[in-house]
Image (cartoon, rainbow, N blue to C red):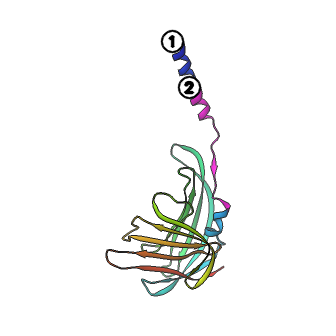
C-alpha cells in the first residue's frame, strides 16, 4: 500500500512537472478573417447615421498586432489594435480582436461612441442568437461578396436586438440596433469606402 501511494504521488508530481514545462501555444488571427477587419492606414468609411440623419466619416489612422498573455494562461493570443478618427466629433477610438482557444472564439469589436458599435463574430457562441455567412448578399442596394452576419441576443446599451453585416475587403456595411422598449431604432449603413 505504501509503495503504491508513493508511486501515485511520484507519478502525479512528474506529470505536473511535465505539464509546466510545455511550450506555450500561440493563437493568431486566422488569415481568412483579416480581409474583414484589417485595412490600410488612411482607409476611410462614410456611413449614414439614422439618429442624426446625416453622413459621417471614420478614418483608420493606425493599426498594429501584438501577442498578449492572460492571467493563469501560458498561451499567447494575437491582438489587433486599431485607432480610428471619428470625423464629426474629432475624437479617437480603438478596437481590438482576440483569437484564442478558450471556447475557440473569434470576435472583433469596435465602439465608435455611445451610439455606434460594430461586432463581427466569425464563430457562434452561446452569447449570440445567430451567425451566418453569405457568398453574396444585397445590402443597402449594393451587392457584396463574402458577407458575415451576426445578431446579438443580449442587450447592448439600451438596445434589445443588434444586427451587423460585414463584407470581405470592405468592413462593416450595415448595423441595425432595435430598442423594443421605446421603438427607437438606429441604422448605420455604409455609403462608400475610400481606400
* Circle 2 crowding by C-alpha within 10 Å: few under 14, some 14–19, many from 20: few
Task: Identify the magenta region.
Answer: 14-31
Closest to the observer, 122 or 112: 122
For the point 37% across and 74% down, which residue is it? 179
Task: Quadrant for residue 63, please give it.
Answer: bottom right
Closest to the observer, 35 or 138: 138
Q: Which mark is residue 13?
A: 2
Query: Does residue 7 sit above or below 68 in this rendering?
Result: above
Badges 2 and 1: C-beta atoms under 8 Å apart? Answer: no
Closest to the observer, 134 or 102: 134
* Circle 1 crowding by C-alpha within 10 Å: few under 14, some 14–19, many from 20: few
Q: Estimate the x, y position of residue 160 in percent, counting from the top left.
A: 38, 70
Say which quadrant the C terminus sits in.
bottom right
Q: Estimate the x, y position of residue 100 in percent, counting from the top left.
A: 57, 53
Q: Dot 1 corresponds to which residue?
A: 2
Which element carries disc 1, helix, strand or loop?
A: helix
Q: Is residue 15 magenta?
A: yes
For the point 50% across and 57% down, which residue is it? 125
Amino acid at each position: 500500500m505504501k509503495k503504491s501511494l508513493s508511486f501515485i504521488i511520484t507519478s502525479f508530481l512528474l506529470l505536473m512537472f511535465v505539464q509546466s514545462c510545455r511550450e506555450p501555444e500561440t493563437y493568431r488571427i486566422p488569415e481568412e478573417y483579416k480581409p474583414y477587419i484589417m485595412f490600410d492606414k488612411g482607409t476611410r468609411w462614410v456611413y449614414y447615421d439614422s439618429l442624426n440623419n446625416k453622413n459621417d466619416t471614420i478614418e483608420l489612422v493606425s493599426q498594429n498586432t501584438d501577442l498578449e498573455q492572460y492571467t493563469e494562461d501560458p498561451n499567447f493570443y494575437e491582438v489587433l489594435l486599431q485607432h480610428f478618427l471619428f470625423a464629426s466629433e474629432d475624437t479617437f477610438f480603438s478596437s481590438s480582436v482576440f483569437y484564442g482557444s478558450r471556447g475557440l472564439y473569434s470576435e472583433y469589436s469596435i465602439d465608435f461612441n455611445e451610439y455606434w458599435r460594430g461586432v463581427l463574430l466569425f464563430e457562434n457562441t452561446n452569447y449570440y442568437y445567430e451567425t451566418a455567412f453569405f457568398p453574396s448578399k444585397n445590402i443597402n442596394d449594393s451587392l457584396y461578396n463574402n458577407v458575415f452576419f451576426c445578431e446579438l441576443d443580449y442587450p447592448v446599451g439600451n438596445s434589445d436586438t443588434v444586427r451587423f453585416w460585414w463584407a470581405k475587403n470592405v468592413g462593416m456595411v450595415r448595423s441595425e440596433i432595435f430598442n423594443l422598449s421605446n421603438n427607437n431604432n438606429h441604422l448605420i449603413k455604409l455609403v462608400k469606402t475610400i481606400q
